[in-house]
């Protein structure tokens, strides 16, 4: 059975889409907490891109593999595309003046 | 399935006891001004491996030492049966003669040629031809023999990653690494940049607290390099093709990249191009995420074979260390099938990681034993890049 979308860790708030193209409005099968669920996409999501499976508020961590992969820069609703337009990295931010290595982020 | 597991491969035994997956005559450039003579010889002589590079001159001393260490380490790789190293006039600390001296300690045949002393590029070419004739007649008499898997140093690397990598191909590679380590072999994980965000996962697998400290130390130093640039790391890491492939941040890329390391304890952390310890297990080499620089460092530590996991497809191929490319992205495999050996995208159709890992393992054993990779057949030579730690002066 082909996998439509992958949630890696029970703590994740995003799933990764593995069908060719997720059209806005379509329902995607995904397992959340071991249960079959369906999430309706609110955006067009390209192959291998992520969408939210829970609400993520601005400033909250985006979680994948059970760890932080960045901070949400706006409120993100389930089914919305999650990528560089609404997620900022917490690491290697030479552009942020006076920042120092934040090793341990996501612990 | 386990019963059919091959626990040996066929390799070339070297005088220093190591076993090689290939029996190449290496034509090694000592400095950029010898590159054309090296390339000319490579075109003229069968069964040679050509390595050229832009370094070896006007480097700050720590950088020059790193260049020499990398070049000598590459020549010491057991895939190399003999070496001709060529330089052009007189360098400091990195002459063909000095490097030949280091390489000769391994017992493998090595000769140095200096272009000026030979009387110029044409005479150096003629000398190289004569030396290669005798050397190849000698090393080509060697036959492959049965070698236990414990003698493999398995290189791990990835590039042009997308979000399929961390879920499919990297997981399959990690499974293969675990299988090799279970039989007493060693693996090398590198690409320190691609540990930022995943340090805690790796540090938890360190065999000792000192090794855990080293993991935090090398990642912190690498992040410092990014911060010192004054720019956001995004765009450099993850790269444009990573972002197109759905990776949103270095943390996400890292958490996927470290899946290549499987589940075994980390028994050592070494510097760039530094030999690893003898203890079986997983080692980390401190390298940048740059694919060419990273796998060049791994090859210089003696790895005979490396799997390169890719999301978008790849042409990367180390000239001496056998490089197998694999992907879990079906579209990429179809677009790049002339340089990608393995497609593990069936993972998205329900194939288990174990089965995919076994496929990788079988390919590694067969290829180490002599099966040619696609890039070897096409003579792709796109990966030799020595890491730099200083500016030119």
Image (tube, coloured by chain):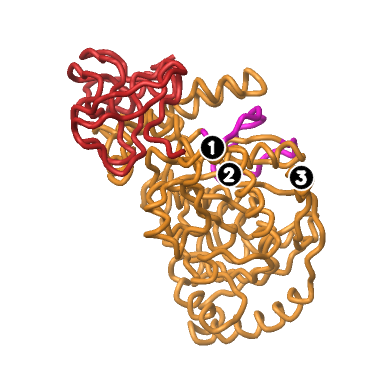
Chain colours: A red, B orange
> Which label sits in the foreground, 3 or 1?
1
Sequence order check, earlier mark of 2 and 1: 1
Residue A83 falls in image quadrant: top left
Q: Tell me the crowding category of disc 2: few under 14, some 14 to 19, or many 20 or more residues within 10 angstroms, Cα based.
A: many
Tag 1 secondary structure: helix
> Which label sits in the foreground, 2 or 1?
2
> In which chain is the residue bearing label 1?
B
Q: Tell me the crowding category of disc 3: few under 14, some 14 to 19, or many 20 or more residues within 10 angstroms, Cα based.
A: some
Q: Which residue is mark 3?
A: B150
* Residue at point 59%, 69% (across, down): B85
* Residue at point 56%, 67% (across, down): B28
Q: Tell me the crowding category of disc 1: few under 14, some 14 to 19, or many 20 or more residues within 10 angstroms, Cα based.
A: many
What's the magenta bit mostly, secondary-structure-wise?
Answer: loop
Give yes or no for residue B270 being in the magenta stretch: yes
Tag 3 secondary structure: helix
**Above or below B325: residue B100:** below
Highlighted magenta segment, given as a residue range? B259-280
> In which chain is the residue bearing label 3?
B
Give the Cα separation between the discs numbered 2 and 3: 21 Å
- What's the mark number on residue B356? 2
């Amino acid at each position: 059975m082909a996998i439509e979308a992958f949630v890696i860790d029970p703590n994740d708030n995003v799933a990764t889409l593995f069908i060719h193209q997720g059209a806005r409005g379509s329902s995607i099968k995904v397992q959340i907490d071991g249960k079959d669920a369906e999430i309706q996409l609110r955006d067009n999501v390209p192959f291998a891109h992520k969408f939210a499976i829970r609400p993520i508020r601005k400033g909250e961590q985006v979680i994948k593999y059970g760890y932080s992969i960045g901070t949400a820069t706006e409120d993100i609703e389930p089914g919305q595309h999650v990528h560089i337009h609404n997620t900022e990295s917490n690491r290697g931010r030479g552009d942020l003046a006076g920042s120092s290595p934040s090793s341990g982020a996501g612990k | 399935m386990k019963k059919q597991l091959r626990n040996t491969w066929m390799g070339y035994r070297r005088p220093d006891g190591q076993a090689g997956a290939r029996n190449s005559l290496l034509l090694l450039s000592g400095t950029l001004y010898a590159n054309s003579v090296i390339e000319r010889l490579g075109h003229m002589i069968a069964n040679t491996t050509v390595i050229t590079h832009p370094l070896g001159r006007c480097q700050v001393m720590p950088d020059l030492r790193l260049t020499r260490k990398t070049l000598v380490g590459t020549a010491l790789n057991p895939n190399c049966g003999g070496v001709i190293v060529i330089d052009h006039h007189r360098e400091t600390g990195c002459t063909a003669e000095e490097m030949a001296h280091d390489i000769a300690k391994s017992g493998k045949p090595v000769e140095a040629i200096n272009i000026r002393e030979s009387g110029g590029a044409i005479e150096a070419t003629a000398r190289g031809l004569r030396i290669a004739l005798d050397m190849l007649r000698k090393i080509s008499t060697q036959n492959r023999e049965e070698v236990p898997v414990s003698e493999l140093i398995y290189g791990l690397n990835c590039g042009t990653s997308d979000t399929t990598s961390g879920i499919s191909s990297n997981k399959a590679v990690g499974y293969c690494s675990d299988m090799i380590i279970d039989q007493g072999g060693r693996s090398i994980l590198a690409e320190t940049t691609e540990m930022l965000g995943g340090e805690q996962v790796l540090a938890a697998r360190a065999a000792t607290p000192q090794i855990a400290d080293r993991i935090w130390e090398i990642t912190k130093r690498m992040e410092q390099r990014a911060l010192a640039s004054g720019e956001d790391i995004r765009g450099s890491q993850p790269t444009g093709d990573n972002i197109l492939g759905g990776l949103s941040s270095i943390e996400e890329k890292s958490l996927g990249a470290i899946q290549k390391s499987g589940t075994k304890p980390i028994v050592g952390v070494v510097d760039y191009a530094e030999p690893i310890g003898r203890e079986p297990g997983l080692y980390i080499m401190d390298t940048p995420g740059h694919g060419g620089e990273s796998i060049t460092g791994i090859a210089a530590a003696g790895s005979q074979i490396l799997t390169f996991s890719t999301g978008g497809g790849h042409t990367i191929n180390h000239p001496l260390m056998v490089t197998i490319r694999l992907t879990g992205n079906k579209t990429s495999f179809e677009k790049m099938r002339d340089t990608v050996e393995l497609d593990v995208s069936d993972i998205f159709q329900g194939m288990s990681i174990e089965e995919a890992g076994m496929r990788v393992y079988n390919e590694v054993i067969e290829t180490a034993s002599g099966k040619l990779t696609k890039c070897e057949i096409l003579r792709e030579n796109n990966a030799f890049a020595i890491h730099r730690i200083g500016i030119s002066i």
